[in-house]
Image: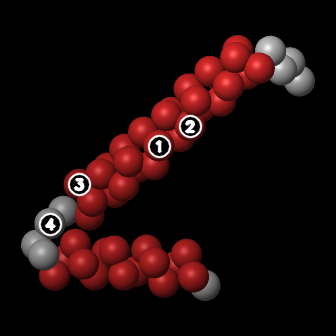
Amino acid sequence: MGKQLTEQTWNCLSVAKDLPFAWQFGERAGTSLGVALVLFLIGLAVKAFLGIDI
């Protein structure tokens, strides 16, 4: 329910601001993937520094 409500809210905001939904989606997806990449690189650095191998 919460996810659906969030998607509906973003869609409404896109329409209200007269922005294409695809642009909003791409912006959010890019931000999410960018954060994931940064966290992955931090994890690799910590793994190398501490010598942890799982």
Nearer-N-terminus badge (3/2) = 3
Residue 22 visible in the snapshot: no
What residue type is disc 2 on? Leu
In three-dimensional space, the C-alpha distance between marks 4 and 1, rounded to whole angstroms, equals: 24 Å
Q: Residue furthest front?
A: 50
Question: Which residue in the protein does label 1 denote?
Answer: 35
Q: Is residue 6 above or below residue 37?
A: below
Task: Point out the tag, 4 or 1, that comes first from the N-terminus.
Answer: 4
Q: Nearer the viewer, mark 1 or mark 3?
A: 1
CA–CA distance in space, label 3 to label 2: 24 Å
Using the image, determine if residue 2 lies above or below residue 43. below
Furthest-right residue in this view: 54
> Which residue was labeled with disc 3?
23
Position of residue 27 relative to residue 4, above or below, is above
Name the disc covering residue 39, or none: 2
Q: Nearer the viewer, residue 39 or 12?
A: 39
* Residue at (57, 82) in percent of width and height: 2
Measured from the top left, where is residue 52 in percent x and y? 83, 20
Toward which corner of the image does residue 1 lie, by quadrant?
bottom right
Q: Secondary structure at mark 1?
A: helix
Mark number for residue 19?
Answer: 4
The numbered mark, 1 or 3, whose residue comes first in the sequence reads: 3
The residue at the point 80 percent across, 15 percent down is: 51
- The kind of residue on which mark 4 rests is Leu
Count of labels in the image:
4
Q: CA distance from mark 4 to mark 2?
A: 30 Å
